[in-house]
Amino acid sequence: MAVSLKVEERATRPRSIRNQLRHEGKVPAVVNGYKVESTPISFDEREFSKLLRENGANTVFAIEIGGKKVNTLLRDSQVDTFTHRLTHVELLSVNLSEETEAETEINLVGESVGVKAGGVLTQTLYTATVSATPEKLPEGIEVDISGLEIGQSLSVGDLPKNDDYTIVTDSEEQIVAVQEAQELPEEDEASEGAEPEVIGESTEE
């Protein structure tokens, strides 16, 4: 189900207007895509961030521009490195009856028996691309790793199937593996008792 986001069309000149919007707590953004020409907009940063926290990054945002209601997805966002505030957002207009592709998080659940036995778990893939109608895009895919033993791994093909979406990412791509912990090499006992050689000192008596 789409959530409502109040937006306003904005001017693009002068360039300082973006800084002015951010100073007012608003985010400069643009919307384009299905039956929508590229349109500069802005919206309240706190409201948008709250909707993201409550509904996830694959939420359908229902907005109104030029008296027309448009359903959108978050396509891209830019965040200030120091303040961590949003500096720009791109929304993609979508048709709710047509499938679209999006990234979704892969969430590991459970504790691997291999880790309990002393193994080391390494996750190499954190997101997967899925295809679905906008309102059925998942916010995350859970994969149970509790049965994973030392020397075993899980790939995209091991992710649980779901009728709501299709996983597009290559099924052979590895997600997580449990390997034996590498032991640190033991120090040479003979070298432990040896005294350091002094440069220039003769070894002859």
Image (cartoon, rainbow, N blue to C red):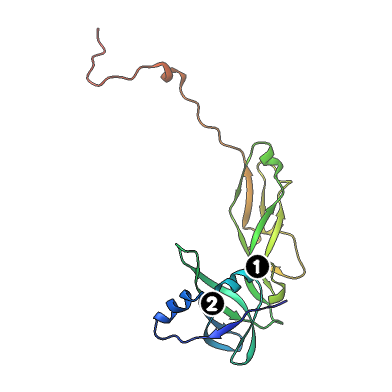
Quarter of image, res 31: bottom right
Q: In this view, does 152 lie above or below 166?
A: above
| Viewer can see residue 29 | yes
Type of amino acid at the residue the image marks with label 1 = Gly
Read off the residue under disc 1. 56
Local SS, label 1: loop
**Mark number, residue 173:** none
**Mark number, residue 90:** 2
Q: Is residue 50 above or below residue 12?
A: above
Q: Residue 184: x and y, percent?
A: 52, 32
Type of amino acid at the residue the image marks with label 2 = Glu
Query: Seen from this angle, which residue lies furthest front?
Result: 24
Query: Seen from this angle, which residue lies furthest right?
Result: 163
Badge 1 crowding class, 10 Å Cα cut-off, few under 14, some 14 to 19, many 20 or more, is some
In the visual, does 22 lie left or right of 196? right
Q: Residue 68: x and y, percent?
A: 63, 91
Q: Is residue 127 above or below residue 203?
A: below
Q: How many labels does the image show?
A: 2
Q: Distance from label 1 to label 2 (Cα)?
A: 16 Å
Quadrant (top left/top right/bottom left/bottom right) for the C terminus: top left
